[in-house]
Image (spheres, grey):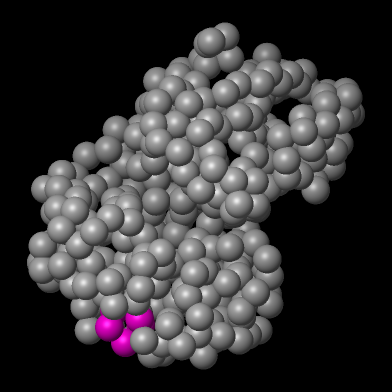
Amino acid sequence: MSLDLQFRPFELELEQPFESGDATITTREGFLIRAEFQEVVGIGEATPLPGWTESLEDCECALEEAVDAADDGSGAVLDAVEDTAAARHGVSLAIADCYATRGARPLYQYLGDGSRVARVPVNSTVGDDDADATAAAARDAVDRGFRSCKLKVGRRSVDEDLTRVERVREAVGDDVEVRVDANGSWTFDEAVEAIRGLDDADVSIVEQPLPAGALEGHADLRGRGPKIALDEGLLEHGVDAICEASAADVLILKPMALGGLDVAREVVTWTDELGLESLVTTTIDGVVARTAAVHLAASVPDVPPCGLATGELLKTDLGRDPVLFEKGAAVVPQAKGLGIDDVWGAT
């Protein structure tokens, strides 16, 4: 059965520039997608990110092909965007929003087992600053209710980063989870040294300590202290290769980079069967994709704290954020479908 599919471009301004690969990004550009099926409207977002997804130009071309295929139904539309992760994310989200809305249930219930979930735990992300500023930022996050803090590491020496982590642990106490994200910046020897010190500071997870290609290195780091999480490594190798190499304890799921909520949900199923943990985060997306990521996390039973509180990184957005953040948790929308206000006509 045919769909009515449309898309339009948008550009969102960031509060501060950030580095992605070799590029410095000051805005997030993408496409808002509208799907109508049997008089029900669904909304999606395709926001490519260099180094993680296809280019903006390739995303637009794929969406044009999807529009051309809309008369042949949702299967043909998804086939048209199969090889472009951000485009597929946006189209599949719009379609899922339609189906969940038609079924009169929140999107997370459509994705999961139908159980009601009120809140999803969220981690605070603390940037790369000196030890005093990092500790103060972590303490502020705890004062605002966060019970999990993730620190960016890897741009300084291992000794400097360990000092920062130790100061954070002193500032937040023993009852707060501390994680670190090295973004693949360490050598193997540096990672071994770092993990020894991070274990002493009771750090729970080290995200991407080595470059994405180093599966054997990550496997060798497991069991030395904190859990090993792969982010970029998941996109490069896939679940099967990671499991075959025993290279991770945790997988970081970015729905935009994986190609959609349905793909990410399949990864969750695999990780459950294989004894791995899954965490959900975003690629600094607009409110439509961020809300979708909250629904994905809500569909995962007993999900650990996830990286979902990223709206504050944007100066402008597509519309009002329906997700409230209280005491270190995202309050999950309970309206039909995505639960977001009509953003299609917004400027």
Q: Determine whether, in the image, residue 7 is placed left or right of residue 325.
A: right
Image point 58% across, 14% down: which residue? 344
**Percent x, y for residue 45?**
60, 31
Q: Based on the displayed image, in which of its 4 quarters is residue 271 positioned?
A: bottom right
Query: In the visual, does 39 lie left or right of 14?
Result: right
The N terminus is located in which quarter?
top right
Q: Position of residue 137 (x, y in %)?
A: 19, 50
* Numbered marks: total: 0
> Is 203 situated above or below 102?
below
**Residue 310 on the magenta span:** no
| Residue at horizontal 36 percent and vertical 67 percent from the top | 156
| Helix, strand or loop for the magenta stretch, by majority | helix
Q: Can residue 304 be seen in this view?
A: no
Residue at the image point whose x is 40% and y is 36% from the top: 16
- Where does the magenta region start and end? 194-198
Is 245 left or right of 333, judged from the image as shown? right
Question: Up-down: is 329 above or below 316?
Answer: below
- Say if 86 sits above or below 7 in the image: below
Q: Is residue 196 magenta?
A: yes
| 83 to the left or right of 88 | right
Residue 88 quadrant: top right
Q: Position of residue 15 (x, y in %)?
A: 39, 31
Q: Where is residue 34 in the image (x, y as percent from the top left)?
A: 66, 21
Please state which of residues 75 and 48 is positioned toward the viewer in this rendering: 48
Residue at horizontal 33 percent and vertical 56 percent from the top: 128
Given residues 297 and 25, the one toward you in this image is 25
Q: Can residue 188 be seen in this view?
A: yes
